[in-house]
Image: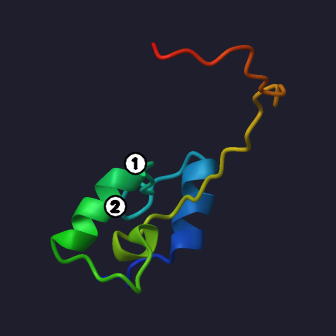
Amino acid sequence: MAAPLTPRERMLLALSHKEGDRIPMSDSIWASTASRWRNEGLPAEIPVSEYFHYEMQGFGPDISPQLMVRILERTPD
């Protein structure tokens, strides 16, 4: 039996439309989910992506218009 692929090898095969030992994994979890998992025993010193062996990492830049906030009036309601 062949040795398992490294995450890099697995991704390169997937991006080349070739079959690897399994599908590369990725997920995007909510912060509240990670917090709950940590409360349920997920080690705090290990990132979730590392714990679950995700091959793909992503980031999402804030592309909102970044408009200034101006309060026009404060009312009891």
Q: Nearer the viewer, residue 77 or 7?
A: 77
Element at badge 1?
A: loop
Residue 40 falls left or right of residue 19: left
- State the residue position of label 2: 34
- State the residue position of label 1: 30
Q: Amino acid at mark 1?
A: Trp
Neighbourhood count class around disc 2 (C-alpha, 10 Å): few under 14, some 14–19, many 20 upward: some
Residue contact at pointers 1 and 2, CB within 8 angstroms: yes
Residue beneath the point at 59% across and 71% down: 8
Q: Which image quarter holds the C terminus?
A: top left
Residue 65 falls left or right of residue 51: right
Residue 15 coordinates in the image, percent (x, y): 62, 50
Q: Which image quarter holds the N terminus?
A: bottom left
Residue 41 falls left or right of residue 62: left
Q: Nearer the viewer, residue 22 or 38?
A: 38
Residue beneath the point at 55% across and 58% down: 56
Residue 17 coordinates in the image, percent (x, y): 57, 45
Query: Hey, which quadrant is residue 66 in on the image?
Result: top right
